[in-house]
Image (spheres, rainbow, N blue to C red):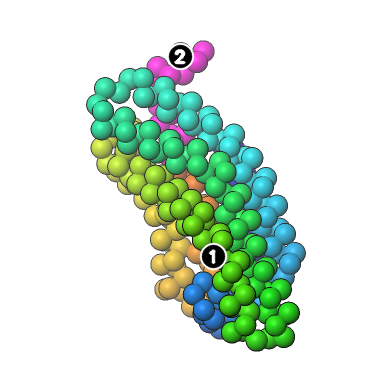
Amino acid sequence: MLFIVPASILFMIGDYAMGIEPRESIVVSGLISSGWQTIADWRITLSNIGGMFGSIFYAIAALAFLEYLKYRLTMMTNKADRIIMRSYMAGLVLGIMGFMYFHLACGTLIHNYNVLIDAAEGNAELAVRMWNRTYNVQAFCYWTTFISLGILVTGGWIIMVLKGLLSLKKGWLLAAPLMVAAIGFLIEIILPLPFNGIASGFESFGWTVMFLGGIRFVGKDERYRKERE
């Protein structure tokens, strides 16, 4: 499960490679930011590579976590609790392919806009119209994956901690990835940083925090350790 640490580091590098923009960046249209034009091709490449290798390390960590959660399921009799844990497990599985897809999809959309606005000779209105054709064919898959992953993992973790399905104190509910991401956005709003995008890597960091919580309660399960021995 500790493979989540190198996974999250690579994801965060990729997130910041795509997410850091000048402070004066403004919204051009919808998701498009004027700051995208400051994101060089090598940064997109770095983000994609980080997403690829990060996904490999995440898969190793997630499969180990899933092995333990399947063990916990065998001891649960409450149907609602089993549904909650299975939903959380489904989110972990979705992350195995989801993280690489996020980096590829986000990076491609940013790169495409930069290519299009260059081809349109700086005509942002024309570039936006052309970019929307690229975005629209990915929008359903992107948002379905992102929302499903966020709900299943963040929601599942919070409910399991609150219901006591995991041997953790209630404060650990803040370790849910989107909760950590929210802290990042709060920091970005409060602190007068000279750039935008500090929140970009917080969701990825949240996975490390959540897995450390998982490692904590797995380590407390002496019965599980004895059975593995």
Tell me: 182 left or right of 61.
left
Q: Main secondary structure of the magenta part?
A: helix
Q: Residue 207 location, x and y as percent?
A: 49, 47
Q: Residues within 10 Å of mark 2 (few under 14, many from 20)?
A: few
Q: Secondary structure at mark 2?
A: helix
Write down the residue under mark 2. Answer: 226
Q: Residue 156 location, x and y as percent?
A: 35, 42
Q: How many marks?
A: 2
Q: Is residue 48 visible?
A: yes
Q: Secondary structure at mark 1?
A: helix
Tell me: 142 left or right of 159.
right
Which quadrant would residue 133 be assigned to in this image?
bottom right
Nearer to me, 16 or 84: 84
Q: Does the magenta segment cover residue 217?
A: yes
Could you give the CA–CA distance between mark 1 and mark 2, rounded to whole angstroms?
Answer: 52 Å
Residue drawn at 56 percent across, 41 percent down: 96
Query: Tag 2: residue type?
Result: Lys
Quadrant of image for the N terminus: top right
Mark carried by residue 33: none
Write down the residue under mark 1. Answer: 136
Instruction: Determine contact: label 1, label 2, CB under 8 Å.
Output: no
Which quadrant would residue 122 be assigned to in this image?
bottom right
Residue drawn at 54 percent across, 31 percent down: 63
Q: Residues within 10 Å of mark 1 (few under 14, many from 20)?
A: few
Tell me: 1 left or right of 119.
left
Q: Residue 71 location, x and y as percent?
A: 41, 22
Residue drawn at 42 percent across, 25 percent down: 70
**Residue 37 drawn above or below residue 203:** below
Q: Earlier in the sequence, mark 1 or mark 2?
A: 1
Q: Residue 163 location, x and y as percent?
A: 25, 37
Query: Tag 1: residue type?
Result: Asn
Q: Which residues are magenta?
A: 211-229
